[in-house]
Amino acid sequence: MYDVLILGAGVSGVSCALVLGSAKNKPFAIDKKIGIITHQKASSLQNAVFNNAYGIPAGKLGSELLEESLSHLEKSYPHVIQIANEKVVKITGTAGDFKIITNKDEYSTKMVVIGIGSGNPFTIEGLENHIIPHQKAIPEKNRIQLRNVDHLVTEGIYACGTLAGLRSQLSIAAGSGASVAGDILTLWNNGNHAQVHDAINKK
């Protein structure tokens, strides 16, 4: 049983995983089982090049970022379990006991974070009642989102990135995933607001 399983390894999904992973030494997170299904084939980063994202050198290819971000996650936070070469097809259950069904296996998790982008059609069965037209994309794009309040779709299920109704911008997606991670850490911390910062030790 996972404490949280992240679906999608684009900008928002991996950002969420990095922040959750970085809390590994916090008393409220030390025993949490975190996983991410790293399907990336549909990511809009595959054909992107970045010149306007904070901290990223101009001309950086999105396809490189996809690979490097998972390497970063593996190197820095190896306890975050990466599940490769699987695509989620169905979600069942309720908060505390979700079943995530892929094309190859089935996983149990207490919470779900979905960051698979806003492409239409939405291919994960079980969330049809939460699908609405994307509120910040031009109609011609025919994008969708999951109805949510501050990323929370329904108890135990979060959306992040463009699937949460945000604009398609790398910096926005990264912040969205990190924001969801902060909300989950706060839940684990009994409702006390939580964040994770590293700092250079000062003598």
Image (cartoon, rainbow, N blue to C red):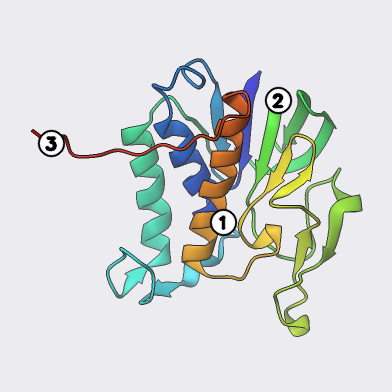
**Earlier residue among tags 3 and 2:** 2
Residue type at the position of mark 1? Lys
As drawn, is 183 to the left or to the right of 70?
A: right
Mark 1 highlights which residue?
Answer: 41
Residue at (40% x, 33% y) in the render: 22
Is any part of residue 40 visible from this angle?
no
The image position of residue 157, as x and y in percent, is: 74, 40
In the picture shown, does residue 59 fall above or below 153?
Answer: below
As drawn, is 83 to the left or to the right of 145?
A: left
**Earlier residue among tags 1 and 2:** 1
Label annotation for residue 110: 2
Q: CA distance from mark 1 to mark 3?
A: 43 Å
The image position of residue 111, as x and y in percent, is: 69, 31
As drawn, is 201 to the left or to the right of 120?
A: left
Is any part of residue 165 visible from this angle?
yes
In the picture shown, does residue 109 fall above or below 150?
Answer: above
Mark 3 highlights which residue?
Answer: 202
**Earlier residue among tags 1 and 3:** 1
Residue type at the position of mark 2? Lys
Few, some or many residues within 10 Å of mark 2 (<14, 14–19, 20+):
some
Q: CA distance from mark 1 to mark 2?
A: 26 Å
The image position of residue 118, as x and y in percent, is: 70, 63
Label 2, secondary structure: give it: strand
Residue 156, located in which quarter of the rendered image?
A: top right
Residue at (61% x, 58% y) in the render: 161
Few, some or many residues within 10 Å of mark 1 (<14, 14–19, 20+):
few
Residue at (55% x, 21% y) in the render: 33
Q: Residue reaching furthest left?
A: 203
Few, some or many residues within 10 Å of mark 3 (<14, 14–19, 20+):
few
Q: Nearer the viewer, mark 1 or mark 3?
A: 3
The image position of residue 4, as x and y in percent, is: 62, 30
